[in-house]
Image: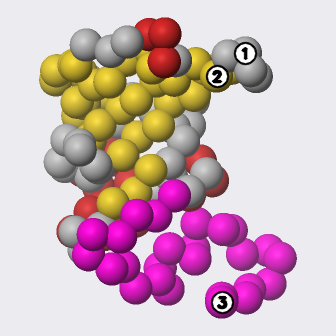
Amino acid sequence: MHITEGNVHDVNALDVLTYEAGGFYIMDKAYVDFKRLFVIHLSRAYYVTRAKDNFNFRRISFVKTDKTDGIICDQTVKLTGIKSSVNYPEILRRIKYFDQEQQRTFVFPTNNFA
């Protein structure tokens, strides 16, 4: 457990965690910081998070999906943002999902391709 004052942003907690190779770290979009996510990647651990609205990328490839499952697209992408592309130079997986119950679309960046 890591307790901080209320004025410390949640993403700072990623700096104090020790990542276990093969482990999965599931986070909300408040934790999207590509420099910190790259540390997880280099630790051979996996993350899944929600993309922020300013998620800038270039599609490298895609996998056909069965849209009846709610998966709109499953892509391999490269970040194109000025800072993010430097802080995270590797490819990512981008999954776009439509939640029928909530009538909402979600985008999930991850470094897990399995």
Q: Which mark is residue 1?
A: 3
Q: Is residue 109 left or right of residue 38?
A: right
Callout 2 amino acid: Asp
> Does 99 appear above or below 112?
above
Question: Is residue 21 inside the magenta stretch?
Answer: yes
Residue at mark 2: 99
- CA distance separating discs 3 and 2: 32 Å
Residue at mark 1: 103
Image x and y of residue 57, in percent:
32, 28
The colour scheme used to paint the residues is secondary structure
Q: Main secondary structure of the magenta part?
A: loop
- CA distance separating discs 3 and 1: 35 Å
**Front position among marks 3 and 1:** 1
Q: Is residue 6 left or right of residue 45?
A: right
Q: Is residue 113 left or right of residue 107?
A: left
> Does 14 appear above or below 86?
below
Chain-order first, disc 3 or disc 1: 3
Question: Can residue 84 be spotted in the picture?
Answer: yes
**SS type, badge 3:** loop
Callout 3 amino acid: Met
Which quadrant is the N terminus positioned in? bottom right
Image x and y of residue 111, in percent:
29, 49
- CA distance separating discs 1 and 2: 6 Å
Question: Is residue 111 inside the magenta stretch?
Answer: no
Quadrant of the image occupied by residue 11: bottom right
Callout 1 amino acid: Gln
Residue interval drawn in magenta? 1-26
Q: Residue at x 22, y 69 (%)?
A: 44
